[in-house]
Image (tube, rainbow, N blue to C red):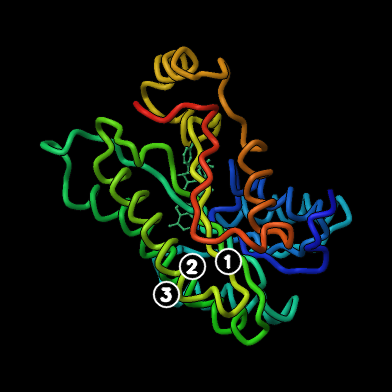
Amino acid sequence: MDLGIGGRTAIVTGGGRGIGAQTALALAAEGVRVVVSDIDEAAAQQVADEVVAQGGGAIAVRCDVCNASDVGRVAAAAEDAFGGVDILVNNAGFNKDRYLTKMSESEWDSVVDVVLKGAFHCSRSVLPGMMARKWGRIVNISSRSVFGNPGQTNYSAAKLGLIGFTRALSLEQAKFGITVNAVAPGFVETELMRTNPTYESLRESATAKNPVGFLGMPDDIASAVAFMASERARYITGVTLYVTGGRFSS
Ligand SMILES: NC(=O)c1ccc[n+]([C@@H]2O[C@H](COP(=O)([O-])OP(=O)(O)OC[C@H]3O[C@@H](n4cnc5c(N)ncnc54)[C@H](O)[C@@H]3O)[C@@H](O)[C@H]2O)c1
């Protein structure tokens, strides 16, 4: 199916690796020009180089999504290189897991900020252009952890907050031809998971609990994001698509 977004321009935050990198590549395969932004500039550059090597259009821009002036520079670079942004994927995120009784204020703040303040800054930076052109797609990467994971009060709260953000913003933007949706992955094999100290046991139990009997790969999420970002999804807004292999509870 042609997704109908060839020639559009996307910003993918946290696009240097994992789900973000795969999303950048999936969008590029649809003919979308991609601004790969990440706090890790070298990683972002590597993904942009890969897109270009495959015949697509891409630039890399270093950006901490929590920093308003970094975010402003990404939007300006996108405008300079490609003439405006049609698609934003709010993907940058990480977790700092600890039971609440042991969690520091900075562990709470950093996770809530990267998810919620990141979506706030990035969405604000692209919306005026989308509204002027009467077309836009914002896809927010939430998580199955919205149903609650022990050790993830910060992450679960932020990712559920992102769903509230998605619903409210979708209502504000519907009349401008802009859809705002969320994709909520279950366990996906990425560095985020591989660097977890309990990765092996986490992986084993996640596989056992997964109704489909296997764990998701970044490409499983990227396909869902590309669809939500597409022309084909024009009548879908304010929803959360769970891409979890059928698993919801912890
Ligand atoms: N992997 C999973 O199982 C899983 C499950 C549910 C949701 N998610 C969500 O999917 C998204 C991507 O996760 P992933 O597994 O690909 O993680 P990852 O750690 O492999 O990649 C995340 C990328 O975000 C970048 N990043 C981190 N902080 C940033 C910041 N402040 N500004 C800009 N970039 C920043 C990192 O440098 C990295 O390149 C995250 O929002 C994560 O919470 C992942």
Q: Nearer the viewer, residue 74 or 184?
A: 184
Residue 131 % position (x, y): 59, 83
Q: Residues within 10 Å of mark 1 (few under 14, many from 20)?
A: many
Q: Residues within 10 Å of mark 2 (few under 14, many from 20)?
A: many
Mark earlier in primary sequence (1, 2): 2
Q: Is mark 3 on a helix, strand or loop?
A: helix
Q: Which of marks 1 and 3 is nearer the N terminus?
A: 3
Amino acid type indicated by mark 3: Ala
- The numbered mark at residue 68 is 3
Q: Which residue is drawn at 40% across and 29% down?
A: 196
| Number of marks | 3
Percent across and percent down for residue 51 are 79, 53
Residues tagged 3 and 2 counted as in contact (Cβ below 8 A): no
Spatial CA distance of label 3 from label 2 is: 22 Å
What residue sits right under mark 1 in the picture?
179
Q: Residue furthest front?
A: 235
**Residue linked to disc 2:** 170
From the Cβ of disc 3, is ligand 1 less than 8 Å away? no
| Labels 1, 3: front one | 1
Classify 168 as above or below 76.
Answer: above
Please state which of residues 10 and 241 is positioned toward the viewer in this rendering. 241
Q: Does the residue labelled 1 lie within 8 Å of ligand 1?
A: no
The picture quadrant where one finds residue 230 is bottom right
Give the Cα distance between marks 1 and 2: 6 Å
Mark 3 crowd level (few <14, some 14–19, many ≥20, 10 Å Cα): some
Residue under the point 54% across and 78% down: 127
Q: Name the residue at 16% across, 38% down.
A: 100
**Helix, strand or loop for disc 1:** strand
The C terminus, quarter of image? top left
Q: Do the residues labelled 1 and 2 touch (CB within 8 Å)?
A: yes
The mark found on residue 79 in the picture is none
Marks 1 and 3 close (CB-CB < 8 Å):
no
